[in-house]
Image (spheres, rainbow, N blue to C red):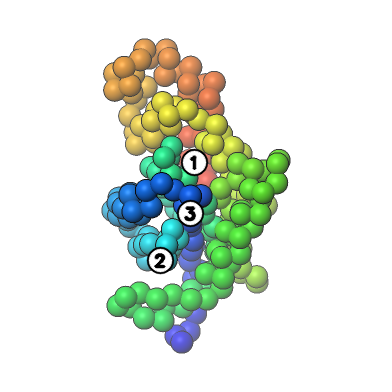
Amino acid sequence: MQDMKQTPSAVVIGDVVGSRTAADRAGLHERLVAVLAEMNTAWAPVAPLTVTAGDEFQGTFADVGSALSASLHLRLALLPAIDVRQGIGWGPVAVLAEAPRVEDGPGWWTARAAIEAVKADATRSGTRSARTRYALAPEVLGPDAAPVNAALLARDHLVGRLSDRSLSVLRGLLAGSTQHELARVEGISASAVSQRVRNDGLGVVLAMDEELRGIR
């Protein structure tokens, strides 16, 4: 094994919620692969997001903020038909092989612990909407987990309550479209878009994404 890198990485491990009961597992897999490819083009992670086994995927980002923001964009790209859980771990990573790339180390172990923790969160009535969790490897300097996870709980709750149209509006806003542009695309009035931004918490999700993306 190579020596662990001195600079930690943000590892993402995810899986599809309820995939075993999906009526079209082949279609689900095809959609997941396509979205991961789009994410890799848009975000250029250190190690590309790839499907590993069954409904699970993983990848590595250079910093926590990028991983947190990418996790939102990935979930939104799949909703409402497919939902995902994601664990994000910050810690040292060892590259065991380059072709294909194989990684190991505390960053990976911590991401695995994070996704197991969010699975547990989702079994409790008060945090049933939880889909994303962040963890910091032991004895590693990095963003504190408690405030990040508080924000992720709120973000997941807001996103989980959105209608199909509000999800579409949120995706458009995150992509840089104006409310007037989205009104034309959605076939609704600009005031209706504005009401969704305000009443459905879309503006809050946008503000949270900006803050979380800036975490280093």
Q: Identify the residue shown where x is 44% and y is 85%.
A: 2
Amino acid type for the residue under numbered disc 3: Arg
Residue lying farthest to the bottom in this orientation: 1
Question: How many residues crowd mark 3 within 10 Å: few (<14), some (14–19), many (20+)?
Answer: few
Q: CA distance from mark 2 to mark 3?
A: 16 Å
Q: CA distance from mark 3 to mark 1?
A: 31 Å
Q: Secondary structure at mark 1?
A: helix
Q: Is residue 145 above or below residue 53?
A: above
Identify the residue shown where x is 52% and y is 69%. 108
Q: Tell me, yes or no, if residue 62 can be seen here.
A: no
Q: SS of the residue at dot 2?
A: loop
Q: In terms of secondary structure, where does tag 3 sit?
A: helix
Query: Which tag is nearer the camera, tag 2 or tag 1?
Result: 2
Ranked by sequence position, the earlier of labels 2 and 3 is 3
Residue annotated with mark 3 = 20
> 173 or 143: which is nearer to us?
173
Decide: marks 2, 3 in contact (CB < 8 A)?
A: no
Instruction: Tell me the number on the disc at residue 209.
Output: 1
Q: Residue type at mark 2?
A: Thr
Q: Which residue in the protein does label 2 denote?
A: 52
